[in-house]
C-alpha cells in the first residue's frame, strides 16, 4: 500500500483530534497523484477527499496498489505492507499529540519537490520507496 501523510517539523500529524494543517494546493496535488487509483481515507478525511473510499478500517482493507491518506492513525503496525510513502512537510512547527511513527530506514528517498502552498509559503513533497 502507498501512504500519503502531511507532517509538521517534528512529525506531528494531529492535535486534539484535529488535523495539524490543511492547504488546498496540497489537496489538489494529492488528487492529481491519486487520479485513476483507489484512494482510501478515514471518515474524518472525507471532507478533504469526497471522491475517496472512506471507512474506519481503510488501512486494513487497502490492497497493494491502493493509496491511503493518513492524518489520524499510527502506522507502525502496517510497516510490512507499505511499499511507498509520499510525505508532505509543512516546514513549520505546530502543536501535535499524534506523530508519524514509521521508521524510514526500510525506505529511500526517490523524489523531492518544493512548491508554494495556499496557506504555507513552502511545502516539501518527498517520495520514499521501499529499498
Image: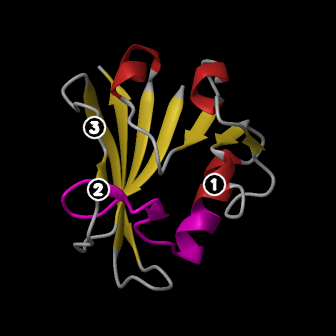
Residue 97 is marked as 2
For the residues labelled 3 and 2, say whether their Cβ atoms are less than 8 Å apart. Answer: no
* CB atoms of marks 3 and 1 within 8 Å: no
Badge 3 or badge 1: first in the primary sequence: 1
- Can you see residue 32? no
Q: CA distance from mark 1 to mark 2?
A: 17 Å
Foreground residue, 67 or 41?
41
At a point 67% along the width and 39% down the height, the residue shown is: 40
Q: Which of these two is toward me, 33 or 69? A: 69
- Disc marking residue 104: none
Q: Earlier in the sequence, mark 1 or mark 2?
A: 1
Residue under numbered circle 3: 101
> Above or below — where is 98 with respect to 74?
below
| Above-or-below relation of 72 to 22 | above
Identity of the residue drawn at 74% across and 48% down: 35
| Residue 113 location (% of width, % of height) | 37, 61
Is residue 88 in the magenta section? Answer: no
39 vs 2, left or right, is right
- Quick check: 98 left or right of 59? left
Q: Residue 31: percent from the left, percent from the top?
A: 67, 57
What residue would you read off at disc 1? 44
* Mark pair 3, 1: CA separation: 20 Å
**Marks 3 and 2, Cα distance to the nearest angstrom?**
12 Å
Amino acid at each position: 500500500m502507498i501512504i500519503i501523510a502531511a507532517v509538521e517539523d517534528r512529525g506531528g500529524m494531529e492535535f486534539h483530534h484535529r488535523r495539524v494543517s490543511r492547504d488546498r494546493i496540497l489537496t489538489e496535488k494529492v488528487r492529481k497523484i491519486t487520479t485513476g487509483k483507489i484512494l482510501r481515507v478515514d471518515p474524518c478525511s472525507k471532507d478533504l477527499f469526497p471522491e475517496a473510499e472512506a471507512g474506519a478500517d481503510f488501512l486494513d482493507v487497502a490492497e497493494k496498489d491502493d493509496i491511503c491518506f493518513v492524518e489520524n492513525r499510527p502506522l507502525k503496525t502496517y510497516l510490512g505492507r507499505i511499499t511507498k510513502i509520499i510525505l508532505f512537510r509543512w516546514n513549520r512547527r505546530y502543536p501535535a499529540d499524534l506523530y508519524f511513527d514509521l521508521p524510514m530506514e526500510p525506505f529511500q528517498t526517490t523524489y523531492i519537490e518544493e512548491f508554494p502552498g495556499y496557506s504555507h509559503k513552502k511545502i516539501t513533497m518527498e517520495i520514499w520507496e521501499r529499498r
